[in-house]
Image: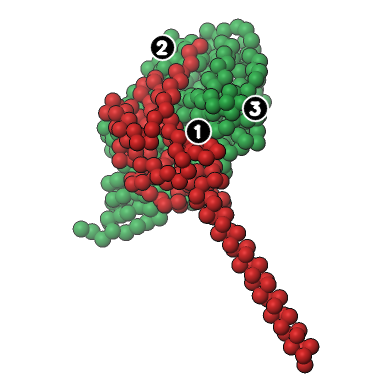
């Protein structure tokens, strides 16, 4: 039985827009954008489809890199780019419809990539909130002590 | 210029089985712009690849959505088979096609019922769902399940279908074909139905192509794109395949395409049964997907082309698995089709892309 051909091509981030426009010019469809978190990079796979052919562009980007949006070439990319931002913390510039992190409602910031800047900042903020709590508790204790001290003094 | 008003549509709405929100920008009764919002039922199912091994995960994929359950388990299995270069026995491929086309029939008839309900034809809705029960009965007889079939695994299928049962499937489908013809006549020719669907929610061929639309939504705008026509898997057994296409570009054309695809699926099942290969239904799969190995697979789900991506890491757990569903690909086309329509037609137009939000958000 026939199986689909598997074509994966690694490119540099700087060549993304040029490659995308070439595919658009040759009437390929955008199939999907998929992100995978690696140890200190994020892999982005752009899949293009034309008839029975499928080709994938693979890009490895360091953490906190801003990726140019391809939504000016393929409007439907806005769905995948917003999704990738919310799940993996990858920032895209000039997205046609940018939900600014409010596309998917997740209980954790960038759950697919805990090393992303957004996830780390959220963890720090959560940690800070605990500290504030502890500080408030400490303050209350201090207050009680002071009151007890006063009673004792009385 | 008329005053613009923003009307929120959804996420809870009688016409929507699942939640999606649209901000509709109106000038009087006309929709000027529609801004979609999703994310209400994101469950993070893809992330479970780190908890379930690649053989167990097939049972997670079929729980992504109740209607496309078989298709997702099939798409996932095909992706892992591409990843590990596993050959599937021809009989297993044929059984996969039979079950997948039965899923398409039940999905399309379910959708036709929902469409009838949306434009206020409740008896038609009930007649559609009554017919659909016959397909669910076939699922129950062949696999034991009506929604979650657990019929596919990596390397083959879990259940064989014997000759007597295959003959029974053909008899049920022939009975369905006769009764279904009467329903199609109402959907395509009834004047009240046409008045709600004709020239409503138009999406031109150029727009559908530019926005990469897929499935019956794209084929109703004249794009002859159907993954089944490339003959992957068991579809290679067919003598030929021509996608059902319409140039109507409106809601009525989307109904027509789906009504014809049900008949086409019955023909496919009957042809596959007439050529049913003998032999094994399962190849034993040993080892794990290689580190860094990547693969994609495409499957024509009832709602359109679905793309599956998997990446291995050398262990029994996948590094990454992703599904790009047809609804995600058709959202941009939906936004385009809504521009310029009347507010009262919005529910019908949304329904004609057959949105599946559970699949899209996973």
Q: Residues within 10 Å of mark 1 (few under 14, many from 20)?
A: many
Residue at x 63%, y 30% (from the top left corner): B317
Q: Are marks 2 and 1 in contact (CB under 8 Å)?
A: no
**In the rendering, which numbered label is found on residue B316?**
3
Point out the tag, 1 or 3, that comes first from the N-terminus: 3
Q: Disc 1 is attached to a residue of which chain?
A: B
- The image shows residue A131 at horizontal and vertical percentages of 62, 64
Can residue B232 be seen by looking at this rendering?
Answer: yes
Q: Nearer the viewer, residue B303 or B54?
A: B54
Q: Which residue corresponds to mark 2?
A: B240
Determine whether the residue tagged by mark 2 lies in a helix, strand or loop.
loop
* Relative height, residue A135 to residue A77 (above, below): below
Rendering colour (chain B): green
Q: Label for residue B194?
A: none
Mark toward the viewer: 2 or 1: 1
- Identify which residue is drawn at 44% across, 24% down: A8
Rendered location of residue B253, percent (x, y): 34, 31
Tell me, for residue B323, which label it has, or none. 1
Total label count?
Answer: 3
Q: Is residue B6 above or below residue B75?
A: below
Q: Nearer the viewer, residue B346 or B235?
A: B235
The CA distance from mark 2 to mark 1 is 28 Å
In primary-sequence order, the first of circles 2 and 1 is 2
Q: Name the foreground residue: B105 vs B293.
A: B293
Give residue B288's position: percent from left, percent from top. Answer: 63, 23
């Amino acid at each position: 039985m026939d199986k689909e051909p598997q074509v994966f091509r690694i490119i540099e981030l700087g060549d993304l827009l040029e490659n995308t426009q070439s595919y658009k010019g040759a009437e390929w469809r955008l199939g999907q954008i998929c992100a995978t978190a690696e140890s200190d990079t994020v892999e982005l796979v752009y899949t293009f489809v034309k008839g029975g052919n499928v080709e994938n562009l693979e890009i490895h980007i360091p953490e906190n890199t801003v990726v140019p949006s391809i939504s000016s070439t393929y409007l439907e990319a806005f769905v995948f780019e917003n999704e990738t931002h919310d799940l993996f913390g990858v920032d895209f510039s000039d997205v046609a419809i940018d939900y600014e992190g409010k596309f998917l409602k997740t209980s954790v910031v960038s759950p697919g990539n805990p090393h992303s800047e957004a996830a780390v900042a959220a963890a720090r903020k959560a940690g800070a909130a605990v500290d504030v709590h502890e500080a408030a508790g400490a303050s209350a204790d201090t207050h009680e002590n002071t009151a007890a001290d006063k009673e004792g003094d009385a | 210029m008329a005053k613009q008003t923003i009307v929120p549509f959804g996420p809870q709405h009688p016409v929507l089985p699942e939640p999606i929100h649209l901000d509709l920008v109106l000038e009087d009764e006309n929709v000027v712009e529609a801004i979609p919002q999703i994310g209400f039922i994101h469950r993070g199912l893809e992330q479970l690849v780190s908890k379930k091994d690649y053989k167990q995960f097939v049972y997670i994929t079929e729980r992504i959505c109740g209607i496309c359950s078989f298709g997702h388990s099939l798409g996932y299995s095909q992706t892992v088979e591409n990843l590990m270069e596993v050959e599937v026995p021809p009989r297993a491929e044929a059984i996969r096609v039979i079950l997948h086309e039965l899923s398409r029939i039940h999905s399309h008839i379910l959708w036709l019922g929902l469409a009838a309900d949306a434009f206020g034809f409740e008896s038609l809705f009930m007649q559609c769902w009554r017919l659909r029960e016959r397909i669910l009965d076939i699922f129950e007889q062949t696999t034991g399940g009506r929604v979650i079939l657990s019929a596919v695994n990596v390397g083959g299928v879990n259940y064989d279908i014997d000759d007597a049962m295959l003959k029974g499937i053909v008899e049920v489908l022939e009975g369905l074909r006769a009764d279904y013809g009467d329903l199609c006549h109402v959907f395509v020719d009834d004047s009240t139905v046409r008045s709600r669907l004709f020239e409503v929610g138009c999406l031109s061929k150029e727009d559908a192509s530019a926005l990469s639309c897929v499935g019956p939504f794209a084929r109703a705008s004249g794009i002859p794109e159907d993954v089944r026509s490339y003959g992957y898997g068991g579809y290679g057994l067919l003598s030929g395949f021509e996608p059902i296409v319409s140039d109507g570009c409106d809601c009525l054309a989307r109904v027509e395409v789906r009504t014809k695809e049900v008949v086409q699926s019955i023909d496919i099942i009957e042809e596959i049964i007439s050529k049913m290969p003998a032999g094994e239904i399962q190849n034993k799969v040993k080892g794990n997907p290689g580190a860094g190995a990547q693969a994609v697979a495409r499957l024509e789900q009832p709602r359109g082309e679905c793309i599956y991506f998997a990446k291995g890491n050398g262990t029994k757990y996948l590094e990454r698995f992703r599904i790009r569903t047809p609804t995600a690909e058709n959202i941009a086309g939906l936004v385009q089709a809504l521009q310029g329509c009347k507010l009262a037609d919005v529910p019908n137009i949304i329904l004609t892309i057959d949105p599946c939000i559970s699949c899209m958000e996973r």
